[in-house]
Amino acid sequence: MKDYVSPLELTLYNQRLWYGPILSSSVIDPDSLNAPQWEAVKHTNGPLLILAGAGSGKTRVITFRVAQLIHHHSVSPGNILSVTFTNKAADEMKARIAEIVGLKASGLQLGTFHGFCVNLLRRFRSEAYLPNGFTIFDGDDQLQVIKSCMKELGVPRDQVSPVAVRNEISRAKDELRTSHQYAEFCEGFFQEVTSKIYSSYQNVLSNAHGLDFGDLIMSSVRLLRESSHALDFCHERYRYIQVDEYQDTNRAQYALIRELASARRNLAVVGDDDQSIYGWRGADIRNLLDFEAEYPDSRVIKLEQNYRSTQMILDAAHHVVSRLPERKEKHLWTDRSDGSLIKVIETYDEEDEAIRVLTEIQNLIAAEGCLRGDFAIMYRTNAQSRPLEECFVKAGLPYQLVGGTEFYSRREIKDLLAYLRVVSNPQDDVSLERVVNVPSRGIGEKTLNWLKEWAASRGVSASSGLRMLASDKSSVPIDDVPSRALKVLGPVADLLVEFDDLARRSSLPYLIEQIFERSGYKNMLELDRDAGADRIENVMELIAATARYADGDPLESLIRYLQEVALVSDVDRMRVDADSITLITLHAAKGLEFKNVFLVGFEEEYCPHFRSFHDPLQMEEERRLAYVGITRAIDRLYLTYARFRGGWGSRARLPSRFIQDIPDDLLETIGRTERVSSSPSTAKIDLSTERSYSDGQKVCHPVFGKGIVISGKIGPSGDEEVQVAFADGGIKLLSVSFANLERM
């Protein structure tokens, strides 16, 4: 997101002293939009709710609407704020708007919530009580601090999970609850312990001049509520506000937007309650569902024409999502032909599933000339990628894994970024602790604790204390510094001062290169015969990625880079034009589309996930997640499930209840229950029986309703007994002669 303009530029914007349209007045052609899309684009003043179904062209509407404001209503780009959730989506919108209105899009504020808040806090850092080089802590950094706080407080990690504590603190911040407010209302052992950790954790961040992702939003809301200067600036600057994916906003983001839009109420939100799948990380679907109640004069426009999928796929998705008890009614339709039936593939286990998927992909590539980039395999959890990856590696089929180890979470990348953070922010002792002994310099916990205590006695951070040791050793009483501590800390102190000097006068790529070499990190990787070459290649990619920060003031470029790179997600780095098959989680796939989609592990305990079985709200979100996965497909959709799978729960598996929701006339079931092996010597396992109800048979019971036969046997009396999993009644053991079952 572009930085804030100066007050002079803002004045010029408001006086509309900017270049006029460079394109003709017909730049936005109403005939290129359907009627509801055009109505949304034309809407200018007042609150607007755009209910945009999957594949309904919402990005086109959003970009055209911004272009309409600029081109036909003479609104300055600087007076428009458009917010979305990923840098990838923001970059796509920027490019489209630039194609329509050209250079006049310059000054438009289009980016993510966190990106906007970073810029806001940088501009008003004195009112927000922040230094220029404040550090942004990602999830791994948070976890590191939380573990340290738990150790200091004596909280055993075998009783309280650090990850659970991190998530609980994030939820509190999503609800705008400070550590003091959280302490007032906490209940039970876990929340009481979390309250103590939250307070300690926040003190560490404050001392390090650091903010986590939750702080970025919460601090911005507090700034707007407490600083009339900041609020007046935003009201004058952002006269038209547009929010994408509104169903994914949490209460803190809702409060931020409400403050920004409170003066003029020119707020347009775009979203789809059917695609609300991030409740587990704080998203509140009520923000969208209650929009009309909050803004009674709002205009509501539904986008229901789908430009992506076949009608078969859309109908299947509708049957899954229409069972939600509370939703904004929409029924997607398309001008496309019905397309092919949705294939349901029953497999023996996860290895069999991977082989079946691989075989189907190879057949389509050979028979129809499909490209590898046309395929995506989606699953509920990251762990499900393992058998797929192993299978593709053996077959020599290239793939890209999204949602695995993210580039910026790799150890060597995190380490080098930590070096940069120590240079940019002398208060950041969290980053210092990460790299002070990397590569190994003989600095153990005892020496580090001494350094922190020694620095604290002088009222400075450990990082600043190191600089004191290096800058004027003669001013430090020799009795204050143990000889061994001085011996091991001295070289790294000198190194840190050297990096400080480089940061003030060198470009960012050169700075990283010098840190990599002079710290000894490069030599450490060169000695690693197993993974050193790959890790060095990752560092080279990091250096190359900083090229656009090479110009301008070196220290300011460093600060800006660190604050921006902290907001990069793995999906932002995904190559949409890659000649490889995409392996991705259902959550990460939202917003994407592929010609051919395989939803693997489409079975009970995976999709829906077993954690949702006793929580109706979580089960509703699982249903929406299935809907999102189905609607990623353009031409073909495959639903696969295994009869047996390792992992949590029972090994014997049931097809997902969401398959049952899809009418049979939309499905083509490929039911083969013997094991498939890539080894010709492996014997096939025949699971057929003489039973009248086979495993997987859909049935209906007069009391329990619809279900699926899990297993069965012929009892001693000759009567058949079956285990049936009912959608609403759980698993029941029934005698066929008495159960009065009906086949479906």
Image (spheres, rainbow, N blue to C red):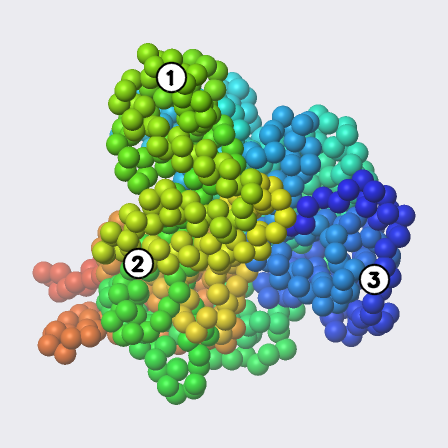
Of 196 and 57, nearer the camera is: 196
Q: Residue 145: name its quadrant.
A: top left
Q: Nearer the viewer, mark 3 or mark 1?
A: 1
Which residue: 30% across, 40% down? 439
The answer to whether mark 1 and mark 2 are in CB contact below 8 A is no
Q: Is residue 587 above or below residue 659?
A: above
Q: Nearer the viewer, mark 3 or mark 2?
A: 2
Image position, residue 473 (x, y; %): 40, 21
Which residue: 55% across, 27% down? 177
Q: Rate crowding at label 2 as few (under 14), some (14 to 19) or many (20 or more) other CA atoms within 10 Å.
A: few
Which residue: 45% across, 66% down? 662
Which residue: 23% across, 56% down? 530
Q: Amino acid at mark 3?
A: His
Q: Amino acid at mark 1?
A: Glu
Q: Is residue 539 above or below residue 226?
A: below
**Label whose residue precedes the other's in the sequence (1 or 2):** 1
Q: Rate crowding at label 1 as few (under 14), some (14 to 19) or many (20 or more) other CA atoms within 10 Å.
A: some
**Secondary element at image label 2:** helix
- Circle on res. 234: none
Residue on which disc 1 sits: 453
Residue on which disc 3 sits: 71
**Label whose residue precedes the other's in the sequence (3 or 2):** 3
Decide if residue 3 is in sight here: yes
Residue on which disc 2 sits: 533
The answer to whether mark 3 and mark 1 are in CB contact below 8 A is no
Image position, residue 75 (x, y; %): 84, 54
Of 656 and 118, nearer the camera is: 118
**Secondary element at image label 1:** helix
Of 568 and 240, nearer the camera is: 568
**Secondary element at image label 3:** helix
**Label whose residue precedes the other's in the sequence (3 or 1):** 3
Q: CA distance from mark 1 to mark 2?
A: 39 Å
